[in-house]
Image (spheres, grey):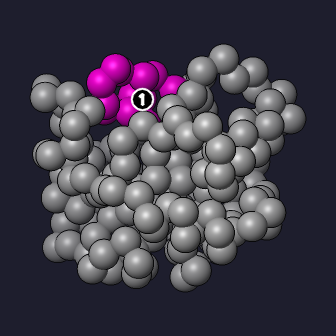
Amino acid sequence: MKLHTKSNTHSNPTALRTEALALDYNERTGHPETKEDLEWAAPNTYLGTTNLTPSSGEIKDAIDEVISITEGQGHTVTNHVAYCQFYLKSTTEPAVHYDIHTGFEPDFKPTHVAILWLCPTNNILEFYDDDLDGASIIEEVTLSQNDLVLFDHVHAHRVKPATFGTDKNDSGLMLAVFMN
């Protein structure tokens, strides 16, 4: 469930988005880090980078900011993995799910996840009760460009597919930082 939100998170959101758009993105089935035996929430719509470990630049600065904000909220971060990701328009909406692991090798089990919204179009992050079969929305958070949402796994979630487009330029591009 949502633990913290912050608007205007990154000091240069335009440069961050430009840097994120320049990255290579893979579908889950062709992602070089994908675990073979894992069920994905919506395998036909996700595209993501490989684990981001930049030594400099806007993406590194944004990851560092996310970790600093998380620690500022009283959560110790000993390890993290980060990906830029987006979902394409599809007849299959992203499923309500828990981020109990990243789904990539090496397996990483987060205790907290932060989404930094990089898309100039607003969207909604939905949080659900614990019953995935008959899930009910218990909270919605509107995401505007450069908004950060920090959450844990008390409740399932999904990004509502309102802005999903045809490529990384018009889809709900985000930086997702998984931490423990």
Q: Is residue 113 left or right of residue 172?
A: right
Q: Is residue 50 left or right of residue 174?
A: left
At a point 44% along the width and 65% down the height, the residue shown is 22
Q: Position of residue 30 (x, y in %)?
A: 15, 46
At a point 75% along the width and 60% down the height, the residue shown is 10
At a point 20% along the width and 72% down the height, the residue shown is 90
Q: Residues within 10 Å of mark 1 (few under 14, many from 20)?
A: some
At a point 50% along the width and 61% down the height, the residue shown is 20
* Position of 90 relative to 66 (above/below): below
Front residue of this view, candidates 74 and 77: 77
State the SS at label 1: loop
Q: Which residue is mark 1?
A: 100
The magenta stretch is 99-110
Q: Main secondary structure of the magenta part?
A: loop
Q: Is residue 125 left or right of residue 40?
A: right
Split into 4 quadrants, where in the image is the C terminus?
A: top right
Residue 101 painted magenta: yes
Q: Is any part of residue 175 visible from this angle?
A: yes
Front residue of this view, candidates 71 and 132: 71
Q: Position of residue 38 (x, y in %)?
A: 19, 30
Residue 54 painted magenta: no
Q: Amino acid at mark 1?
A: Ile
Q: Is any part of residue 127 visible from this angle?
A: no
